[in-house]
Image: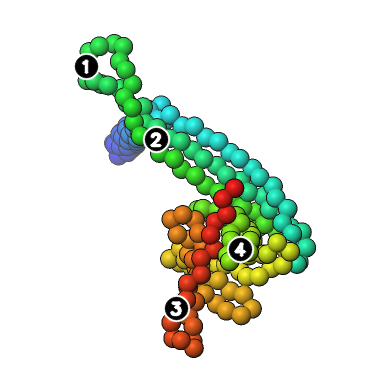
Amino acid sequence: MNNVTFHENCITNSSSNKYTFVIYQLLKLNFMKTIILGMAAFLLTLNIQAQNKNVKSEVKTTVTTVKDSEGEKKLVKKEEVQEIQNIELKDAESKVLNKDLKETPVEVISKTEVSVDGLTRVVDVDRSAYYILDGQKYQISLDKDGYKMTNPNSKKLALLRKTSNNNYIYRNNNKISLGYFDQDGNLILETYDEKTDKITLEKFSLAKE
């Protein structure tokens, strides 16, 4: 009698375990299905967003050889400009099949990468150009940490290093000044004169090509 009861209990426990396993597998499949559907919806949203934008990209690479008192250095500048425009329809909610496109603003995103001496960095605006002060022409060009200023004889005169507030520290053998570029692209230097206890201004005018 006891043997029969024990056998019946084993059958009952075995059946219960099978039901539990089946339920667990069903829950697991349902969970995986939910994840897959969620990922599909996410990718579909990204695809729709991409289709609703018109993106035009242009990359320009310039290689320049810069000469100074230390010799020749090769500067590689890679400029990437993206024009992004949202695609929107006029009267999007109307039932007309053929709809005209609505004019939308174009967002321009530019990025400039500069490689000097094997080091690459990103600059917001490239200030490399010729500048004039008191009739003398100076060249400002990128280096691995900022900019350097040279005269027509390729002699290095000064260094420009960017500060955290987008100004520059100008340093040469004789002075240290605060520099910045005005809205016209000219380089303005502010220097403290210890003798007069005043700030003197110098303007390096951007040379027009």
Residue extending farthest to the left is: 94
Is there a contact, CB below 8 Å, between mark 1 and mark 4?
Answer: no
Is there a contact, CB below 8 Å, between mark 2 and mark 1?
Answer: no
Marked residue nearer the N-terminal end (2 or 1): 1
Tell me the residue that label 3 is attached to. 199
Looking at the rendered image, the disc whose residue lies closer to the viewer, 3 or 4, is 4
For the residues labelled 2 and 1, the Cα–Cα distance comes to: 25 Å
For the residues labelled 1 and 4, the Cα–Cα distance comes to: 65 Å
Observer-nearest residue: 209 or 155?
Answer: 209
Question: What amino acid is found at the position of numbered circle 1 in the picture?
Answer: Ser
Marked residue nearer the N-terminal end (1 or 3): 1
Tell me the residue that label 2 is attached to. 106
Give the percent coordinates (x, y) of residue 96: 25, 11
Q: Secondary structure at mark 2?
A: strand
Quadrant, the N terminus: top left
Residue extending farthest to the bottom is: 195
Tell me the residue that label 1 is attached to. 94
Tell me the residue that label 4 is attached to. 135
Q: Residue at x 44, y 86 (%)?
A: 197
Marked residue nearer the N-terminal end (3 or 4): 4
Tell me the number on the disc at residue 131: none
Question: What amino acid is found at the position of numbered circle 2 in the picture?
Answer: Val
Observer-nearest residue: 4 or 151?
Answer: 151
For the residues labelled 1 and 3, the Cα–Cα distance comes to: 65 Å
Q: Residues within 10 Å of mark 1 (few under 14, many from 20)?
A: few
Looking at the rendered image, the disc whose residue lies closer to the viewer, 2 or 4, is 4
Q: Residue at x 67, y 50 (%)?
A: 76
Q: Secondary structure at mark 4?
A: loop
